[in-house]
Image (cartoon, rainbow, N blue to C red):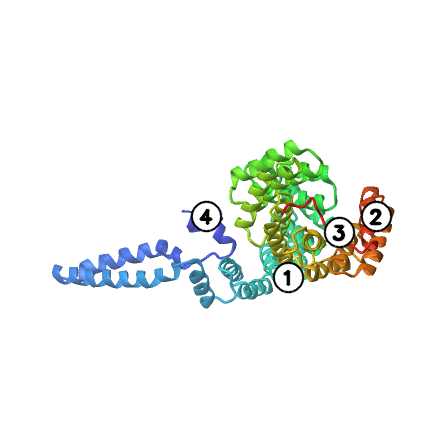
């Protein structure tokens, strides 16, 4: 009955006829054919043979016809062969192609669908996703905005618009898009989580924490939300609550390198260095390309007296993050000031220290201090003295009195023609 046309079912939005509806109209023809067959075929044997032949023929035709239903991509390609102007088939084929990573071809079909039917909000959203994945953020934003204009209550379009703005670094626009997404669909954990990240980037930590809690209200086992809330609470000094969420993230996803990293930072703040080391080692095992985990592991190992392990970790961190001044500074300090002569390398220390200072425009007092130590280790005491004096000036301007006093002590060594040795470092 639904397919007779008395009820407006979903397919009838696009077509009032379809080949697979013909079984309804065919019933009368089959009845007429069967009656005629019985009347005009005199021999029962021939009737059975003919019926068997027909059955075999229909079986072959059915097998041939069913081939188009092997998978979604085959079905939609077959549909477009018969009807190239079927815009919905272009959209559905685009989805199948996107799912298997054939994004360029998917883009072609989304564009063709929009040429045939420009008002398809879903096609605009899907095209925007593919463009965003290929780095065309301006094009992606254009299509996400069009999708959200065509359908003002389209949470996925708002969400993806927010992601595109995040990647452009436009945090205000990203926030507006994510708020529209959660307004359209309050139970949208990914959008709440993304909103929290955006608010955190704007240093609005209390609002960010609220957004992450809202995420967990709808998805209590959302590991990224636990990790993000852990990070925000740690930044606010609420370490016990932060640890609760960090451990919950690990319970949900024990193989999360980021969760291990966040818990390690909490352990470091609590001076539980062995636990921190264990979590950092897990983080770099699970994600060998995690530069900051290698960096923090280097600091923990150095403090624990494993200087060689620390240098290995710091070198790996530098390889992965060659333009991170903190990583460069840590490596330079180890190589310039460690008591073990076999471990030190004045050339590598100077290279790393200079790069750290260059990246911070020679204004950071700690990095200038390290560069001065590297110059002294290389025997260039004139540059060591000049750089240490710049470090003292920068520390004084920043109000870092203790740092300035430490550099003054080292400056006295340089003036005496002696390099600084960090006797507190373990061997």
Residue at 82% across / 51% down in the picture?
411
From the image, tell me which residue sits under label 1: 135
Give the Cα separation between the discs numbered 3 and 4. Answer: 92 Å
Pick the front one: 10 or 239: 239
Give the Cα separation between the discs numbered 1 and 4. Answer: 49 Å
- In what element is the residue under mark 3? loop
Q: In this image, 421 relative to 308: left or right?
A: right
- Say the numbered circle drawn on residue 6: 4
- Say the numbered circle drawn on residue 408: 2
Q: Are discs 3 and 2 less than 8 Å apart at CB?
A: no
User: Reading the chain from its start, which is encountered first: label 4 or label 2?
Assistant: 4
Pick the front one: 399 or 409: 409
Q: Position of residue 265 (x, y in %)?
A: 64, 41
User: Reading the chain from its start, which is encountered first: label 1 or label 2?
Assistant: 1
Nearest-to-viewer mark from 1 and 2: 2
Q: In this image, 87 relative to 326: left or right?
A: left
- Mark 2 nearby-residue class (10 Å; few <14, some 14–19, many ≥20): some
- Mark 4 nearby-residue class (10 Å; few <14, some 14–19, many ≥20): few
Pick the front one: 332 or 6: 332
Q: Are discs 4 and 2 less than 8 Å apart at CB?
A: no
Q: Is residue 107 visible?
A: yes
Give the Cα separation between the discs numbered 4 and 2. Answer: 92 Å
User: Reading the chain from its start, which is encountered first: label 1 or label 4?
Assistant: 4
From the image, tell me which residue sits under label 3: 420
């Amino acid at each position: 009955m639904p397919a007779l046309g008395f009820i407006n079912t979903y397919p009838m939005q696009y077509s009032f006829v379809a080949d697979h509806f013909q079984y309804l109209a065919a019933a009368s023809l089959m009845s007429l054919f069967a009656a005629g067959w019985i009347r005009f075929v005199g021999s029962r044997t021939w009737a059975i043979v003919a019926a068997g032949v027909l059955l075999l023929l229909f079986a072959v035709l059915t097998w041939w016809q069913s081939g188009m239903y092997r998978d979604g991509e085959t079905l939609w390609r077959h549909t477009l062969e018969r009807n190239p102007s079927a815009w919905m088939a272009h959209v559905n084929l685009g989805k199948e192609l996107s799912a298997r990573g054939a994004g360029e071809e998917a883009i072609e079909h989304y564009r063709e669908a929009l040429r045939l039917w420009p008002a398809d909000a879903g096609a605009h959203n899907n095209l925007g996703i593919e463009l965003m994945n290929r780095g065309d953020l301006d094009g992606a934003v254009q299509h996400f905005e069009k999708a959200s204009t065509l359908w003002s209550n389209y949470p996925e379009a708002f969400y993806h618009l927010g992601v595109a703005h995040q990647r452009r670094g436009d945090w205000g626009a990203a926030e507006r898009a994510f708020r529209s997404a959660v307004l359209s669909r309050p139970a949208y954990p990914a959008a709440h989580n993304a909103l929290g990240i955006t608010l955190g980037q704007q240093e609005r930590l209390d609002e960010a924490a609220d957004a992450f809690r809202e995420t967990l209200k709808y998805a209590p086992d959302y590991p990224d939300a636990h990790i993000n809330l852990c990070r925000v609470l740690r930044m606010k000094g609420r370490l016990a609550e932060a640890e609760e969420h960090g451990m919950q993230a690990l319970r949900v996803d024990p193989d999360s390198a980021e969760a291990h990293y966040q818990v390690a930072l909490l352990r470091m703040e609590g001076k539980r260095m062995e636990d921190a080391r264990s979590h950092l080692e897990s983080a770099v095992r699970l994600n060998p390309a995690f530069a900051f985990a290698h960096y923090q592991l280097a600091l923990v190992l150095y403090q624990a007296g494993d200087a060689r392990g620390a240098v290995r970790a710091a070198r790996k961190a530098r390889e992965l993050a060659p333009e991170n001044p903190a990583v460069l500074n840590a490596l330079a300090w180890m190589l310039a000031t460690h008591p073990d002569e076999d471990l030190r390398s004045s050339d590598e220390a100077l290279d790393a220290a200079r790069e750290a200072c260059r990246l911070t425009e020679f204004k950071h007092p700690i990095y200038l201090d390290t560069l001065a130590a590297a110059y002294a280790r290389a025997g260039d005491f004139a540059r060591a003295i000049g750089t240490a004096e710049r470090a003292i000036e920068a520390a004084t301007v920043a109000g870092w009195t203790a740092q300035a006093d430490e550099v003054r002590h080292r400056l006295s060594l340089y003036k005496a023609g002696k390099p600084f040795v960090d006797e507190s470092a373990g061997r």
